[in-house]
Image (tube, coloured by chain):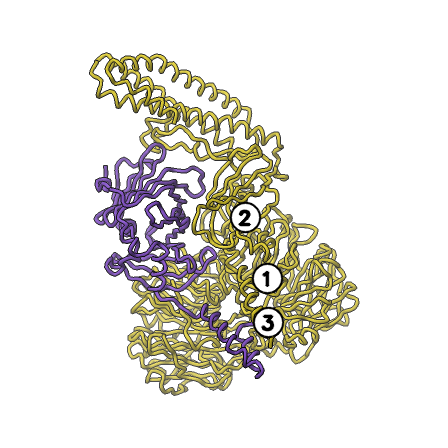
Chain colours: A yellow, B purple
Amino acid sequence: MKSAFIFFVGLFFATSANAQISSATFGMMEARQIGPATMGGRLTAIEGVNNEPRIIYVGSAGGGVWKTTNAGVSFKSIFDKYCQSIGALAVDQKNPKVIFVGTGESNMRNTVSVGDGLYRSTDEGENWTKINGFDSTEHISRIIIDPQNSNNIYVAVPGPLWSDSKHRGLYKSTDGGKTFEKIFFINEQTGVADIAVNTNNPSIVYATTWEFRRKPYSFNSGGKGSGIYKSIDGGKTWKELANGLPAKPFGRSAITLAPSAPDNLIAIIEAEKTGLYISADGGETWKNQSATVNVVSRPFYFSCLVIDPKDPKRVYRPGFGFSYSDDGGYSFADGGGNVHSDHHALWINPNYTNQMYLGTDGGLYVSNDRGANWMMLSVLPVSQFYHVTYDMKDPYNVYGGLQDNQSWYAPSQSAGGIENSDWKNIGGGDGFWVQVDGMNPDIVYSESQGGEIVHTDLKQGKAFGIKPQQALNDEKLRFNWNTPIVIGQKNKRNLYIASQYLYRSVDEGKNWIKISPDLTTNNKEKQKQEQSGGLSADNTSAENHCTIFTLAESPLDENLIWAGTDDGNLQYTTDGGKTWTNVAANYTAAGIPAQTWVSSIEPSRFDKNVVYASFDNHMYGDVKTYFAKSTDMGKTWMMLKSEEFTGYAHKIKEDNLNKDLLFAGTEMGLYASLDAGTNWFRMKNNIPWKALVRDIQIHPVTNDLILATHGRGIMIVDNITPMRSMTKEVAAKDVVIFDSKPINLTMGKNYVGSGSGDGYIGGNSSQQAAIQYYFKDRVNSGEVKIDIYDKQGKLVQTIPGSKRRGINIVDWNMRTTPPKVASGGTKIDFGGFVAPMVLPGEYTVKLKVGDKQYENKLMMQRDPGSDMTLADMEDQYNTAMQLYNMHERLGKLVDSISNKQKMLQQYLPNIKNAKLKKTVQEYYNKLEDLRSNLLATKQKSQFADEKKLREDITEVYAAVCNQETKPSNLQKERTGVLLQQVGDAEKLGATINAQYEQKVKNELVKEKLDKMDTEVKKKDNQ
Amino acid sequence: MPLQSVLTLLFKNKKMKKIKGITFLIAAVLLSQFLHAQTVDEIINKHVAAMGGREKILTLSSAFMAGTFQATGDTALIAITSTKKHLIGSRIDIEANQTNNYQIITPQNGWIFTPVQGDKEPRLLNEDQFKVGQVQLDLQGPFINSDQKGYKIEMAGTEVIDGVMCNKLKVTASNTNVTVYYIDSKSNFIVRASTKMFQFGALEDVITTYGDYNKNEDGFWFAYTNITPRGKTHYNKIVTNVPVDVNIFKTN
């Protein structure tokens, strides 16, 4: 009893202590979402606001919901805290503040994600409420709001793809979406795929039911449960429609009606012979019509069918391509324009039906001529990566393959941000793994589905296929849809690829050595892919099974290689492939189901016996998160568990430097552990909370965390060093300034040019010196600022500090405070905004928090990659400081002149003596003559430039400060000339004052207006 | 192991009955931390108390604030003063490049004059700017006499801001301005305000982060620092209930 109580109390305190480190601790380390958007990911739903069609919502397969308020010029993501797989959207057109989002895409391909229910917003997407009753639906295909009564809402739920479910069916709300009731259910294998509601009589509802099932190695669309049904009482009772329809069984059917003539129905019915069917009497009778291949192809994947809101004859069939009909569906033609294939959503502006928005596997398009021509809106960064890698260039490039959108690479930083045009194509098909050769950074390997690997020489522009071929006595090779290509971590020369066998090449894939037997279960029952598809054959290598899915060479030993298969085997070799040991039984003993996909393996870089793995069992209907760790070479496994985990597991990654720092990616989020997997937290730092994180890399030089997401492109969390430093001991302190590596003094190389500014632009990392510190709690009282001092103790610059709880990152531009330039005149002189870059050396950072102060050192160093010597830098700094000081001297002179002029102006109206008045005016005018030669005083507009001494100094000063080279001979010569001119101006000022000041003062005494001297001096001294 | 699992584990053993009472008590305390959802009034009351209390705030009639403004990405500190007479007028003056730039808001109209940007004479604020600027007039804030001033206040959930859990209150003014205030659930100070504003024709959220809460000499609490996307304002001095000449709320 005592021990249990202590355990309980201990739990409480442990929880309290751990609560100090959480996602919020690292909230300031925001991820950069670098795109791309030049090839978007799959879009699944589009809904606009009829009365305000510039407002459009777009749902994506793995990138959440996006909203535009300018008809597509720009978008904002509005669903980042929730499930990112979107199946359906609906806007209440009577009250467009109300929006519904059905999560779980319903284009049931092999890689389709899952949803977690239905959400409702009553404020145009600002806030969302999850609606009870849909948590286990996994896929929602359609939401329709009764056009006459917004309280009536229908939600079509096909339901889970990989398992039976009682949650399938048609749901209805009669209270505006607060509660729902299931009103139509066939069986646990059959869901509702599509619905249509009569616009004139909303009690008439049509529903198509669909029996379907995927297994890891096959797909079946069709069965007794599939059919077309009609209700005339708002879903209370249903009758099946059959008159004129093909013989059952059906597969997936799409149905739609003409909003302007709702008795006109069109359906595409998957059957033994898939066809197009038309009804003109509300579905009572149907007629089969001829159709193009596009209209009837792949119905399980293309389920979109739309009739123009005003013209019942104009029908659209977005499918593999884009087809349209002008005669109510009796005949179709294929649309034109340059548009990505595979269409899933179409929204037509009801006020101007020429305008329509199309969602495809490659992004969002708009047409203003009813689909004849399309323009891509390349501002949606919803690309779907499978994997990511990097190279060692500066800036480094990221590489990865995209679902249905080939393989690409792009720099991690670029002029003006990472634009669509920065992304370069490097392979075709569906892209998956891309690897950069370990020895030659110009050789890149990419692949398309089923192991079609290509060797590309970026320098020469040559590419050729290097896929291993079946050898004598080998079985037919089985390559996974997403075949692993891996570079050796210990021996970078090693290139690996796997079918059911593992191959290694040491000559860039030109020749291969098979280094394993069949490592899979080789279960022949799981190898009948030719029979896959159900009513419509569908065998695109997506169902290939009994294959190696993941592999890794130990960073400590090139002979230690791990391989995981899609049918549950996890094997390793310690002798470079001569012998293999299967540890599948060992991980199942830890509670991970047998035959689970091994989705990633991470051999530790600190201990050969330690290995991490992730397991994905969702293809058997189990979406739980499985991560595990072994410390004895796979003999025993320990599950890594967390209440935070959601979604099936894709990737586990050990940090390069801190063995206790782990990252994990699932279908619903990114997680981190700072204690070797004991505790985990969800990372939310500008990362959608339930992002589909497929791959994770850590760059060894920049320490950036690089994420491949399947719906939000590539994300980069710059420099995770603070995470490595964050321990319980650190977290317990009130304030900690973290040590920093020596910082290179650079002005941001690779920033030549400014980019086009078109389309989506991903941010660059800061090129400034990051000062990182930790606050145990947010600072609410007391100012936070950072003073930076040089080694001589001179204050170089003061920077406002952030005050959030957790890690704070403040950038210092590595420069001094700008000079105080001469003020006044008719234009702003930007010399007052420019400052010299500091010299290499040790600096002191003083973090001031209210009345407390914390210190640390910061070492600034010459960039080893720069062609500037230390002498060059000193030359630049000294010249810049000469000009800096000139500005300050000139500023002082101008201030003095202005103050005197101000005083003279005050006295002038009071002076009665005409001679004195004339003298004072002369004095004033002489000062003005001088002032007007020191700074621009006459410029009337920015289009009529005027340059005087201040502006002349700035021209050279700014150039010298902002160039990454030593000053030129003429810059230095010019500096000397300007120095002379400043001196001359000072002398002239002194001469004028000598001529007038005392004389005027004496006369003012006589006039009893003798405060001038005192006042002016006082001003001068300020 | 989740708390619920621990409790279940404990109660499976009949011998553990004696500690049921204690564990329930602890569990109740713990769970109450998660289950207790605060009402709008509770949040407002705590906030108002943290700011010195309703009675004290009601005595606030004017304020003069002086400090510096540092534009984002810039190092120069620019002198800024703000003068407010509760519900009568608000004036912000910024000295830049020897020019006096100002913004004036009154219940009737608003003006802006920025000679540093080439203005030759004051300009009327456009309607959206004027509407948003109205919040500056309310020196006592929207949580004092809210109904009387026409504010509609709703709970808008919770969110972690700057690492601290905040209650979100959505305040809709009678002129349809909408601002969401993020109030630190521990300190009860406003950490952030997000105001809907038209920027280049589109409705955008403009976020202001508040900090450096201190009492001035007269005992009124103020956030001495605020940060917007444009820069940071830090007040060195705030004097309150000083006479304010209403003529300063007219253009020169």
User: Looking at numbered disc 2 in the image, what kind of residue is underneath it?
Assistant: Gln
Residue that mark 1 sits on:
A673
Q: Residues within 10 Å of mark 3 (few under 14, many from 20)?
A: few
In the structure shown, which secondary structural element does the residue marked by tag 1 occupy?
A: strand
SS under mark 2:
strand
Distance, label 2 to label 1, CA atoms, is: 20 Å
Q: Position of residue A224 (x, y in %)?
A: 49, 86
Using residue A673 as the reference point, say whether residue B33 is left or right of it. Answer: left
Q: Chain of mark 1?
A: A
Residue B198 point in image, percent of width and height: 32, 52
Amino acid, disc 3 = Phe
Residue on which disc 3 sits: A7
Label 2 vs 3, first from the N-terminus: 3
Report how far apart the C-alphas of labels 2 and 3 lie in the structure. 37 Å
**In which image quadrant can residue A919 be found?**
top left
The residue positioned 59% from the left and 66% from the top of the image is A650
Front position in the image: A224 or B113: B113
**Callout 2 and callout 1 share a chain:** yes
Which mark lies nearer to you, 2 or 3? Answer: 3
Label 2: which residue? Answer: A772
Chain at numbered mark 3: A
- Check the picture and name the quadrant holding the C terminus of chain B: top left
Q: Camera-side residue: A362 or B2?
A: B2
The quarter in which the N terminus of chain B is drawn is bottom right
Q: Of discs 3 and 1, which sits in the foreground? A: 3
In this rendering, does residue B128 appear at all?
Answer: no
In the rendered image of this protein, does residue A826 appear above or below residue A593?
above
Q: Is residue B48 visible?
A: yes
For image coordinates 34% across by 72% down, the residue present is A313
Same chain for mark 2 and mark 3? The answer is yes
Q: Of the residues under marks 3 and 1, which one precedes in the sequence? A: 3
